[in-house]
Image (cartoon, rainbow, N blue to C red):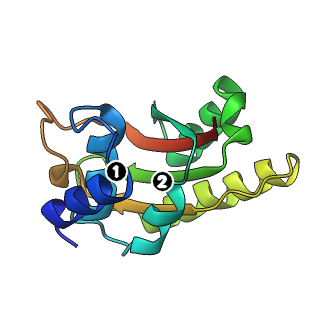
């Protein structure tokens, strides 16, 4: 799906969402960007449910796993979310898939201590050059989490 297709679908599913909002931009990027792992359009439909509040959390760390631990430790409210979409941004160079797998395993281990039922619960990855407005390549690993909460 292209960015334009994603934008049109978000407008259709959530006509009152402000197009200039951080949440709108991140959703359009998540579903319409040049992701290295394909995302399911049905996740967008689930994510944009009725009576929901949204939040974007940006994390940087020495590893993707470090970003996961920051999310759990610094944003415990994220464990109460109805849905979470997240993407990993690779530092300069190729995506290190083993590092992303380690982060997702850490996420699963952390969440077994907190019962959750995220719907959707999806992730993808982007190479650093795929994300616009980067003034310089970041040596840090990054994770962006888009959360949906009950209103």
Q: Measured from the top left, where is residue 17 in percent x and y?
A: 34, 39
* Count of labels in the image: 2
Which picture quadrant has residue 41?
A: bottom left
Q: Which label was assigned to residue 140?
A: none
Crowdedness of circle 1 by 10 Å Cα count: few (<14), some, many (20+)? many
Query: Along the horizontal axis of the image, is 27 left or right of 79?
Result: left
Q: Measured from the top left, where is residue 109 in percent x and y?
A: 79, 55
Instruction: Compute the Cα span from label 1 to label 2.
Output: 10 Å
Q: Measured from the top left, where is residue 44 in percent x and y?
A: 43, 62
Q: What residue sits 46% from the left and 73% below the top?
A: 42
Q: Measured from the top left, where is residue 22 in percent x and y?
A: 31, 33
Query: Along the horizontal axis of the image, is 127 left or right of 73?
Result: left
Q: What residue sits 17% from the left and 60% below the top?
A: 3
Dots 1, 2 in contact, CB < 8 A:
yes
Which picture quadrant has residue 102?
A: bottom right
Q: Which label was assigned to residue 27?
A: 1
Q: Nearer the viewer, residue 18 or 139?
A: 18
Q: Nearer the viewer, residue 98 or 37?
A: 37
Of the numbered discs 1 and 2, the one sitting upstream in the chain is: 1
On the image, numbered disc 2 is attached to which residue?
48
The N terminus - image quarter: bottom left
Crowdedness of circle 2 by 10 Å Cα count: few (<14), some, many (20+)? some
| Residue found at the far top of this picture | 74
Query: Along the horizontal axis of the image, is 90 left or right of 118?
Result: left
Determine whether the residue tagged by mark 2 lies in a helix, strand or loop. Answer: loop
Q: What residue sits 37% from the left and 50% below the top?
A: 14
Determine whether the residue tagged by mark 1 lies in a helix, strand or loop. Answer: helix
Q: Nearer the viewer, residue 3 or 68?
A: 3
Q: What residue sits 17% from the left and 55% below the top?
A: 130
Pair 1/2: label in front: 2
The C terminus - image quarter: top right
Q: Nearer the viewer, residue 48 or 83?
A: 48
């Amino acid at each position: 799906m292209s960015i334009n297709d994603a934008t049109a679908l978000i407008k259709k599913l959530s006509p009152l969402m402000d197009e200039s909002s951080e949440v709108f931009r991140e959703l359009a990027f998540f579903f319409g960007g040049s992701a290295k792992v394909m995302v399911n359009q049905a996740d967008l439909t689930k994510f944009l449910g009725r009576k929901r509040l949204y939040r974007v959390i940006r994390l940087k760390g020495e590893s993707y796993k470090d970003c996961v631990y920051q999310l759990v430790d610094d944003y415990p409210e994220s464990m109460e979310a109805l849905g979470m979409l997240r993407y990993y941004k690779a530092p300069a160079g190729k995506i290190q898939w083993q590092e992303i797998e380690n982060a997702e395993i850490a996420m699963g281990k952390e969440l077994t201590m907190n019962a959750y039922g995220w719907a959707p619960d999806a992730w993808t990855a982007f190479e650093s050059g795929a994300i616009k407005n980067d003034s310089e390549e970041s040596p840090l690993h990054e994770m962006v989490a888009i959360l949906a909460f009950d209103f």
